[in-house]
Amino acid sequence: MMVPSLDKQAAVMVECVQNHTPEVMVIDEIGRANEVEAARTCKQRGVRIVASAHGDLRKLLKNKPLRGLVGGVESVTVGDALAKEKSKGDGPVRKLLAQRGGEPIFEVIVELRRGEYKTWRLVMDAAAAVDAILDGQSYEAQVRRRTDDGNAFEYELVKA
């Protein structure tokens, strides 16, 4: 379905689900909070979503309007024992921690980087990656590369 203007994209997404019951929606770019909510509505109705959003996973978590795409972030207060455990012994004890607020809209994330036309990064478990980032840990990703002759792909697992 064509979107007449960017201001109407969220409404068109919901209208599409209500009137056409798609199995999959492909969205050019999600860039506003109302589009994130529309994508969540579509996902809750069983629609798989393929969409783009500017920024890598860590940048999405810092982007308040878009962080809902990867589950959102909420602050929680923890008890003394857990706060000491999370402080890793050498840092200050923090009782207010960040955690993922819900299920990500996307299970898999593909990161493309400017100027790297033969390489991309796949995060196969978005929820686990977000949890790791919020816990100050690295997460697992696959880096895939097209060979110079273009006839094959190479990949390696990396900690990001």
Image: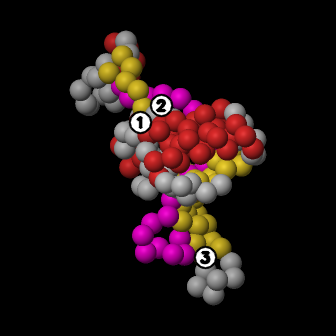
Q: Badges 2 and 1: C-beta atoms under 8 Å apart?
A: yes
Q: Badges 3 and 2: C-beta atoms under 8 Å apart?
A: no
- In the depicted structure, whether residue 29 falls above or below residue 47: below
- In the depicted structure, whether residue 19 falls above or below residue 80: below
- Quadrant in which the N terminus appears: bottom right
Horizontal placement of 111 versus 14: left or right?
left
Mark nearest the camera among 2 and 1 is 2
Choose the circle earlier in sequence order: 3 or 1. 1
Residue matched to label 2: 100
Residue type at mark 3: give it. Arg
Crowding around mark 3 (Cα neighbors within 10 Å: few <14, some 14 to 19, many 20+) is some
- Distance from label 3 to label 1 (Cα)? 31 Å
- Distance from label 2 to label 1 (Cα)? 8 Å
- Distance from label 3 to label 2 (Cα)? 33 Å
- In the depicted structure, whether residue 63 falls above or below residue 78: below
Residue matched to label 3: 146
Pick whichever, 77 or 48, lies toward us. 48
How far across and down, in percent of the image, does residue 134 sit?
41, 36
**Residue 159 shows in this picture:** no
- In the depicted structure, whether residue 103 falls above or below residue 138: above
Crowding around mark 2 (Cα neighbors within 10 Å: few <14, some 14 to 19, many 20+) is many
Residue type at mark 1: give it. Leu
Magenta region, residue range = 97-119
Residue farthest to the left? 92
Please report the residue visible at 37 percent of the width from the left and 44 percent of the height from the top: 63
The secondary structure that most of the magenta stretch takes on is: loop
Residue matched to label 1: 134
